[in-house]
Image (cartoon, rainbow, N blue to C red):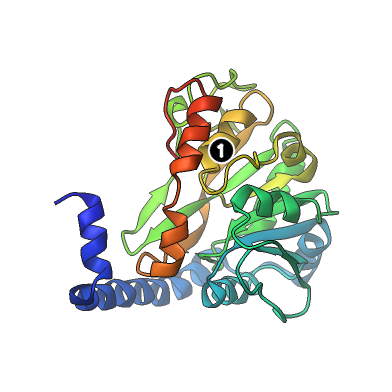
Amino acid sequence: MDVRRIKRALRGRFGRPLRAAYRLAETAQLAAVRPLDRARHGSPTPEERAEVARRVTMTVKTFERPAVLRRCLASARTVFDGRVVVADDSREPARDLGPGVDVVALPFNSGVPVGRNAALDEVRTEYVFVSDDDIVFTAASDLVAAMHYLDDNPGVDLVALTRVDLPRWRAVESRDARALFAGAAAPLVAYGTVIDGLPVVPKTPQLYLARTASVHKVRWDERLRMVDHRDFFSRAAGTIVSVQAQTVRAYHMRTPFDPLYTAYREDVAEDQRTLWRLWSGRGAGA
């Protein structure tokens, strides 16, 4: 049975027990890891949290997942006190998300690149923290450490957190240049080079702290709607230097059984054609 058939089966009425087991596994894993992360990582001082809040703006792209967005923001507030900019192209964009959270309401289904660019344009701090709405943060999401790393390493533009996919418990990272489209520029620093303990990588999860000015040099291609990830880092090659932090992490809790969301998320045929044209027909994966 291929992946598409499996997904259809899980989303159908007979997949209800499997969906329940999936969600239960996610919830149990997160409940178990939260106290462990607190014990391992501790808590930043009030002064450190205040400095991060002053120097960092968080951006979140969301679409038709209000409960998922609120879960993300509630967890973010356990580690981050600064301004959050939410770009929302849902039919009814979110409102009243709490102090320090600004919503950029966009036309329905504008797409991920439009939303990320709109949020970025609202950032006035030197650093931007980019996230999706289906991320959950814990004490392991150490933005103080990430900020200090960038302070200490001016040749690095972006430091990624490790994204752990639940319930598979899979850490996401890409160290192979084949993660980029053929035709991407040569890196400024060779992939695999270790800078102050962290490896230079071609592509990271959409979960990172970066210099705002550096992200502005790349931005997101608004000719695309959903499949933006590989394209962003392919265009970033030769322009910015990205590293991956293995011990600083957050958790990815997908919504694979939401039929409304997935109908739009999986509508990528036009994006694939656009990527084919942009990258000489050499592949159009996410």
Amino acid of disc 1: Leu
Residue at numbered disc 1: 198
Image quadrant where residue 100 sits: bottom right
Residue at the far left in the pictured view:
1
Image quadrant where residue 166 sits: bottom left
Q: Is residue 240 visible?
A: yes
Q: Is residue 149 left or right of residue 17?
A: right
Q: Is residue 192 visible?
A: no
| Front in this rendered view, residue 47 or 258 | 258
On the image, the x and y values in percent for residue 87 come to: 68, 62
| Front in this rendered view, residue 247 or 88 | 88
Which residue is rendered at x = 41% and y = 61% of the image? 262
Disc 1 crowd rating (10 Å Cα; few below 14, some 14-19, many 20+) is: some
Q: Is residue 61 left or right of residue 53?
A: left
On the image, the x and y values in percent for residue 11 come to: 28, 69
The number of numbered badges drawn on the structure is 1
Which residue is rendered at x = 19% and y = 49% of the image? 2
On the image, the x and y values in percent for residue 156 come to: 69, 34
On the image, the x and y values in percent for residue 239 come to: 69, 27
* 210 over 70 or under it: above or below: above
